[in-house]
Amino acid sequence: MSVSSRIRGLHELLAAKKISAAELTKAYRSAIEKHNEALGAYVSTSFETAEKAAEQADKRIAQGDELPLLWGIPMALKDNISTTGLSTTCCSKILSGYTPIYDATLWERLKAQGAVLLGKTNMDEFAMGSSTETSCYFPARNPHDPTRVAGGSSGGSASSVAANLAAYSIGSDTGGSIRQPASFCGIVGFKPTYGRVSRYGLIAYASSLDQMGPLAPTVEDAAIIYSAIAGYDPKDSTSSQLPVSPVDLSGDIRGLKIALPQEYISGVGEEAKAAILAAVKTYESLGAIVEEISLPSASYSLPVYYILACAEASSNLARYDGIRYGYKAEQYTDLDDMVCKTRTQGFGKEVQRRILLGNYVLSAGYYDAYYKKAQNLRRVIIRDIENIFEKYDAILTPTVPSTAFELGFAPSDPVETYLTDICTVTANIAGLPGISLPCGTDSKGLPIGMQLMAKRFEDSRLLKIAHAYEQAAGEVCKKIDLLNF
Amino acid sequence: MITREDVKRVCELSKLTLSEEELDGMLADMEAIVAFADTINAVEIDEEGLPPFQTIQNAFRPDEVIPSLPPQEILKNADGGENGYFAVGKTF
């Protein structure tokens, strides 16, 4: 069965006036009202503004204008993306009651394309986690098996799209937080090149690694969303001024060279390994050349990632002091006591752990051994990756070593939890575009994802490579559709 | 090797107040994480061909005055502030 774009399908229905944006929005609203309690995908909803936006969208549709593909289509944003007048909490008690007074550039761009925002999606607190269980509200569940996690940190974004409680959603990815939940939920998750999508209005976790991107049912959907959000933004000095190459998914991939790092294949379960090797066969049948390579830096990319991410987080999260926004402790003796109590009561345990680790690796006596060494190793990883891309067009790996695990599984040793990110952190360390797409299911029927990475700013080419596989493979895992219209 | 004193010190630096019991749990977690982080110390770095620290250029906008966010709006998230300022309790 061929894989077809959900956004294009809805666009055609809207353009042909077979359904109105208002009706579509109401259908999503009723699906969310019925199923969100079981899935925990949304932490807040904005149905009234969504319905007004949909009515406005319908007015333009009625005029018969040619409109963007995203026009009038209901979607969701992760709860760390700033939206004027709508609660944005990073699923943390410390931001309870906070309402942004400005929009993220990404959201401004989507609004200009006619996007209709249904609500904000669940996430691990401050995007720190791999299962959306560190959310201060409730965990997000996997539509394929609600006793299992949706992944994280963009778990709510993945769950909402996989169940069709949003046509598509936006997540953020610091070490795999778009790609890992996409893999667990059987959808596509795309982290663009660092600097390709403005981070203005994304509440910071680790600024040199953070990137927003789409979670969507298909590669074509991800490409449509990417095209709407990519490009330079004067409000983000780390956004790139390079022109955005238009996405062209057509044409074959004959002669394309794909590297398969053994280090990532050997570390995964048998079922994931078999699914990846079957994907390799599909690529070969399309005329691509797949070769096993070695990526020695894979063995230390994870500790490098955690040192750098925690160091940056400890600095970024220093701003939460109970004075300017969010939660404030009620009883205290003096200013210092107020700040300490606010932070201790407001941050969850995982966030506290990462702040402490970050301040530890940055503190006098440890800076050189950890932070400086990790920065240097980041350069080694970048060099190793650049060497690979001299010979290859893309790198193929599993997205996650396992499929979705049961809620409450979280190991008592935090390091074991961190190992979930082993395949995904490299793209963040080196700033590469990375995409996860479904490539099979395990014996329980749970989705298995594969990851493709390309050279920096080759986002369009990466999407084409992923699309070629998706079209050749067809539907590889069960589709769940809770929308009724 | 991270000690209990180290954890106490980073708690102070981080403005976090942990109870003695919480400190025990955090020490155990941090011991495991720091041991994991220590694995990078065994890696020798071959400096040849290393890219510079900063591979991304800052993209500055033109130095032109653009409207800032209105202070009264900003202060709404801080209980309104006082006389146009953020307000904190008495510190003396």
Image (cartoon, coloured by chain):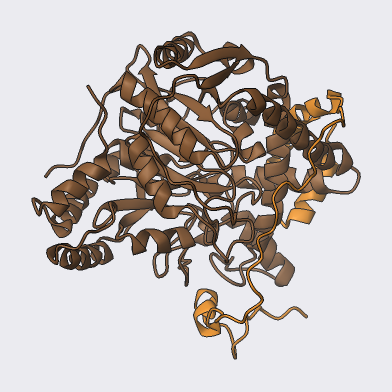
Question: Quadrant of residue A56 in the image?
Answer: bottom left
Q: Position of residue A82 (x, y in %)?
A: 47, 62
Q: Position of residue A96 (x, y in %)?
A: 48, 61
Q: Residue at x 51, y 53 (%)?
A: A92
Judge left or right: residue A419 versus residue A13: right
Quarter of the image with the N terminus of chain A is top left
- Total labels drawn: 0
Image colour assigned to chain A: brown
Q: Tell me: residue B45, above or below residue B77.
A: above
Quarter of the image with the C terminus of chain A is top left
Judge left or right: residue B59 versus residue A451: right
Q: Tell me: residue A198, above or below residue A331.
A: above
Q: Residue at x 78, y 28 (%)?
A: B35
Image colour assigned to chain B: orange
Question: Quadrant of residue A258 in the image?
Answer: top right
Q: Position of residue A162 (x, y in %)?
A: 31, 36
- Residue A151 at least partly seen: no
- Residue A28 at least partly seen: yes
- Taking the view exactly as shown, the residue that stands out farthest to the bottom is B83
Judge left or right: residue A274 versus residue A430: left
- Taking the view exactly as shown, the residue that stands out farthest to the right is A365
Q: Which residue is drawn at 59% across and 65% down?
A: A329
Q: Position of residue A22 (x, y in %)?
A: 16, 59
- Taking the view exactly as shown, the residue that stands out farthest to the left is A18
